[in-house]
Amino acid sequence: MVIKEFSFELLAQNENARLGKIYTPRGIIETPAFMPVGTLGTVKGVYVEDLIKTNSQIILGNTYHLMLRPGVEVLKKFKGLHNFMNWKKPILTDSGGFQIMSLSKFNKIDRNIGAIFKSHLDGTKIILSPELSIQIQKNINSDIMMVLDECPKYTNDKKVISNAIETSTQWAKRCKIEFGINKKKALFGIVQGGLFEDLRLESLANLKDLNFDGYAMGGLAVGETQFEMQEILKKTVSYMPIKKPRYLMGVGTPSDILVAVKEGIDMFDCVMPTRSGRTGLAFTWQGKINLKNSKYKLDKTPLDKTTNLRNINMYSKSYLNHLIKTNELLASMIISLHNINFYQEFMKKMRTSIKEKKFNKFYNKYYKLFN
């Protein structure tokens, strides 16, 4: 099947939970989908060929960090990140908007200019404008690009959130112009508004007027409770365009994903599988397992006896416990790969549950297990 243009197909619904496909020239993404995070052009500790074997269909790269290292000139030399890291499937790039929040002590906002950063690496002044963000994403050769937005820190100050929406809307317009017309690629708008329903709907209405290829919920998973996140999704996701993909940025745990899919979200990304892998936390069909715990010192069982992925089912919990306690890198590599594989299996079974109209049963079983 030769795919020439970006498109989205909604295949089925089970109440609000959606089953779909995103078509790109570099491959099909089945939704709900989880995107492993490769901020600097690598999913930490995991070989690309192993990522493919986990059925990861798309990964995420980061515009701000890739702009600094390896730099635009290197990416241009390789005609994009796909060739540079030897990943042939789709890539989505964050615009740098999250770094406006996470690196707030290194930047200030000028609505008319963009985000003015002092590099966290060497202090160099960097002006990340909406136009430059899109230009860099084009040099990354990203398949799905994100608009530059102002992602405020968690706050109940409605004026701060409202100002961020004004900035984000203006920047979204500029990103849309810079992106131009390219039917092979996609540009997603990012809805802001914190936990305020009226501001979320205002932000969404502004973006819908610009007719993006997909719509993301930003500014969540920044300190609010899971209940607060679910409530704002419940009040706002149904207003997002039905025939375009819906993306919840930076989420999350298996229970977070379940909550969001229940409200109609299609796409997710999070560092959770690999970050947890580096701290000895594994996600399994029996729940979360902290392999640092001494109770695994003599446990001969593997994390998942059913997988033969790189033979990681040959390693016992006892051995992993030993590797963690001796600070061996192999521990984080094995657990990270296991976690990504688990997440992708989790998403696959979730898609099947939606197709078979059994999502609520799946939700109830695994929400209790992981919450």
Image (cartoon, rainbow, N blue to C red):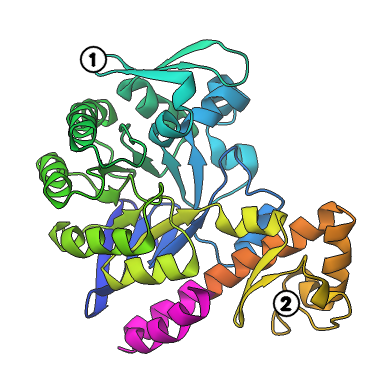
Q: Quadrant of residue 116?
A: top left
Q: Say if 48 sits above or below 181 in the image.
A: below
- Left or right: 117, with 201 as reference point: right
> Disc 1 on helix, strand or loop?
loop
Q: Say if 360 sits above or below 291 in the image.
A: below
Residue at position x 36%, y 37% in the image: 153
Q: Nearer the viewer, residue 365 or 207?
A: 365
The circle on residue 112 is 1
Residue at position x 48%, y 69% in the image: 254
Q: State whether residue 284 appears in this view.
A: yes
- Left or right: 137, with 7 as reference point: right
Q: Say if 64 sits above or below 82 in the image.
A: above
Q: Magenta stretch: residue 358 in it? A: yes
> Disc 2 on helix, strand or loop?
loop
The amino acid type found where label 2 is placed reads Leu
Residue 183 drawn at (x, y percent): 27, 44
Main secondary structure along the magenta-highlighted residues? helix
Residue 165 drawn at (x, y percent): 20, 34
Q: Say if 33 sits above or below 148 in the image.
A: below
Q: Quadrant of the N terminus?
A: bottom left
Residue at position x 55%, y 37% in the image: 81
Using a 10 Å C-alpha cutoff, classify the residue at mark 1 as few (fewer than 14 neighbours), some (14 to 19) or many (20 or more): few
First-in-chain label (1 vs 2): 1
Residue 95 drawn at (x, y percent): 39, 34
Q: Nearer the viewer, residue 66 or 256?
A: 256
> Disc 1 and disc 2: Cα gap in Å?
52 Å
Q: Nearer the viewer, residue 358 or 370?
A: 370
Q: State whether residue 138 appears in this view.
A: no
The amino acid type found where label 1 is placed reads Asn
User: Range of the magenta residues?
Assistant: 346-371
The circle on residue 303 is 2
